[in-house]
Image (cartoon, grey):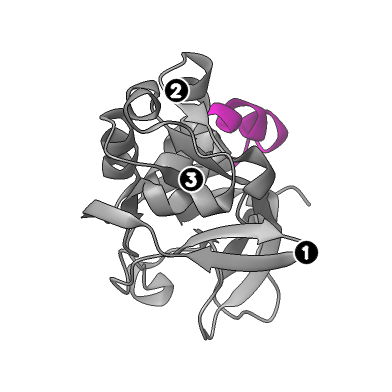
Amino acid sequence: CRASGRLKVDVPSRVARLLIAPALPEFFRQHPDIELELGSSDRSVDLVQEGVDCVLRVGQLGNSSLVARRLGEMQLINCASPAYLEEHGEPRTPADLDRHWAVNYASPSSGRVLPWEYREDGRTLTRALRSRVTVNNAESYIACCLSGLGLIQIPAYDVREHLQRGELREVLPQWRAEAMPAYALYPHRRHLSRRVRASS
């Protein structure tokens, strides 16, 4: 039986614009009887209260009564603008970060500032970097980096176009943070609807 009906999905706004929207033509070729209502927010959505079938979330999940299906992971990279690197030099090792500035990113849900992370010898390490600005959304995070205010760690898809145009450069490529898992979350149901299965 072919999946059909209305599917209400909520994803982070940049994921909607950069990943989901470009993939929709192929999705609709495969599932012509699905009508999609795509919400794009960076807030926590109450699936039952708001009638949402499925949400996409990235990163470690908190305790939840929702069913989580892992979809893959998003590679994080370290970036800086050419103007920042011209003024401050390029970090070559994690120890160099002590002399650099970062744009801090605070979780929109908890307000917690996320630490600078990197992998070394199979371990995840963190480092405190100086910062003059803290933001809580990806648009501002990227804009501050483009303005030369500091280094950022961000999913590669988020800055692909900026990298291609030379507006940002990857730094410390051998000391990236651990990739972030991506999940589809949906309410407990005895059987997952065909609409949700089709979307994930």
Report the amino acid beneath label 3. Answer: Ile
Q: Is residue 95 shown left or right of residue 145? A: right
Report the amino acid beneath label 2. Answer: His
Q: Is residue 57 shown left or right of residue 46? A: right
Q: Secondary structure at mark 2?
A: helix
Q: Earlier in the sequence, mark 2 or mark 1?
A: 1
Residue at 69% from the left image edge and 63% from the top image edge: 70
Q: Quadrant of residue 125?
A: bottom right
Question: Is residue 45 one of those drawn in magenta?
Answer: no
Residue at 62% from the left image edge and 76% from the top image edge: 67
Density class for disc 1 (Cα within 10 Å; few <14, some 14-19, many ≥20) is few
Main SS of the magenta part reads helix
Mark nearer the viewer, 2 or 1: 1
Residue at 60% from the left image edge and 55% from the top image edge: 177
Mark 1 — residue? 122
Residue 19: % across, % down: 54, 36
Q: Earlier in the sequence, mark 1 or mark 3?
A: 1
Residue 106: % across, % down: 31, 62
Report the amino acid beneath label 1. Answer: Gly
Question: Is residue 23 one of those drawn in magenta?
Answer: yes
Question: Pointers 2 and 3 in contact (CB under 8 A)?
Answer: no
Residue 142: % across, % down: 34, 37
Numbered range of the magenta stretch: 21-33
Mark 3 — residue? 154
Query: Looking at the rendered structure, which numbered label has been put on residue 109?
Result: none
Mark nearer the viewer, 1 or 3: 1
Q: Residue furthest left?
A: 132
Query: Looking at the rendered structure, which numbered label has been put on residue 162?
Result: 2
